[in-house]
Image (cartoon, rainbow, N blue to C red):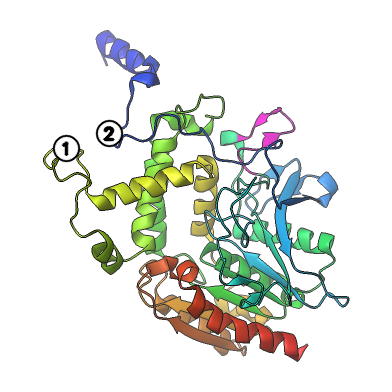
Amino acid sequence: MSSDDDWQADDLSRRDLDAYVHPRGYTPDLPVTGAWQPGDPEGDRRFHRVGAGRPFALEGGGVLPEVTMAYETWGDLSPDADNAILLCHALTGDAHAHGEVGDGHPTPGWWNGVVGPGCAVDTDRYFVVCVNVLGGCQGSTGPASTDPETGRPYGSTFPTVTVRDMVRCQASVADHLGVDRWLAVVGGSMGGMQALEWAVMYPDRVRAVAPIATALAASAWQIAWSAVGRTALAIDPRFRDGDYYDAEPGDGPHAGLAIARSIAQIHYRSDPVFGDRFGRDLVDPRHVFGRWDRFQVESYLDYHGEKLVRRFDANSYLLLNRAMDLHDVARDRGSLDQALERLAPVPFLTLSITSDILYPTAQQAALRDAVREAGGRCDHHVVQSPDGHDGFLVATDQVGRALGPFLEETHADG
């Protein structure tokens, strides 16, 4: 490279990012991170220090000096501690599975209608717990948390976590709450991965498991979608290799995170839903031929991208998305058959969504067959919904009709 080329490269690397405006035209003052931070309203969060603040070794070899888990609970634990249900959230979820918008909770509970008084997960009957996963950004230790060894956010130094690491932290919360054995562990998507790992890692601590719209291992199709989303986030020049927390509002990786969310939003839903809702409608019919004039579906994607930016953290998105790619029940356990031998006594319920192209019905059917071949019980229900992978969150009536009787039967069997 000539000296002139060197100068040009250096000049570009020093260029003020204020001059960079993303063509999608996101709101200019979006927060650098939507992570919850100490001092913010706690809402219904409660906190637990894993291992009494001792270092926590991770499956991938990293070590965290200390780990705090944020969680919420609903209902009362019975005297025999036999009515506790653990809900495991999906990629961009958090511990607020049930409830309304309020201080500390910018969005309503992600499973309202399935969880609550008189619902399938009846908070008048069960003691319900939901934990923000390790690596998350709504109160549990994650990349936006302060590293006690440096006094600064972990950022790019936060180590890789796996679903198994998340489950070990949840087990510590269970100990803290006095729950020796869950009545059931329930979750969809990434939450279903956690439920599966609970059954394999702690079969004596779960009476039943309901992994919904999930898989025994991440497929090449799922990994491919995830890789594109993560790349879209990472190439945002304001991502700064993960060390962006000192930036001013509007100067964070909001465009990258919003686009990653938009990519996901496409395969979370379905073509019929997009077609019925948006068709080929334009945001402004007077503006058609400009390069960035928008169809209504584009406006929808931009809206949901910004909405996520306001409540989530870009580093957490990368970290948890990668943890989903690493999910494989058989990993380092000899074989899938050997892994599933441990869970034969645990009854399973799995649900599929008819229009789910990301976690198609065949994957839950494979889970059903694998559990049965290992000598266990697995009920499999198919939810008729046009809403794609998000159907497990949206089709609350159908999900509840399958999940409620399963929980009641498990509770009655004592």
Residue 248 image position (x, y, % from top left): 51, 24
Give the total number of marks visible in the rendering: 2
Q: Residue at x 39, y 34 (%)?
A: 27
Tag 1: amino acid: Arg
Tag 2: amino acid: Pro
CB under 8 Å between callouts 1 and 2? yes
Q: Is residue 145 left or right of residue 12?
A: right
Which residue is tagged 2?
23
Q: Where does the magenta region start and end? A: 142-154
Looking at the image, tell me whether mark 1 or mark 2 is earlier in sequence order.
2
Q: Specify whether residue 259 is painted magenta.
A: no
Residue 190 image position (x, y, % from top left): 54, 62
Q: Residue at x 58, y 69 (%)?
A: 187
State whether the magenta stretch is mostly helix, strand or loop. Answer: loop
Judged from this view, the residue extending furthest toward the left is 289
Most foreground residue, 19 or 393: 393
Quadrant for the N terminus, please: top left
The reply to whether residue 405 is in sight is yes
Q: Specify whether residue 143 is painted magenta.
A: yes
In the displayed structure, 47 sits above or below 338; it is: above
Residue 113 image position (x, y, % from top left): 56, 70
Residue 343 image position (x, y, % from top left): 66, 80
Which residue is tagged 1?
291
Q: Is residue 225 left or right of residue 271?
A: right
Q: Is residue 363 left or right of residue 85?
A: left
Most foreground residue, 384 or 334: 384
In the displayed structure, 247 sits above or below 59; it is: above
Q: Residues within 10 Å of mark 2 (few under 14, many from 20)?
A: few
Judged from this view, the residue extending furthest toward the right is 79
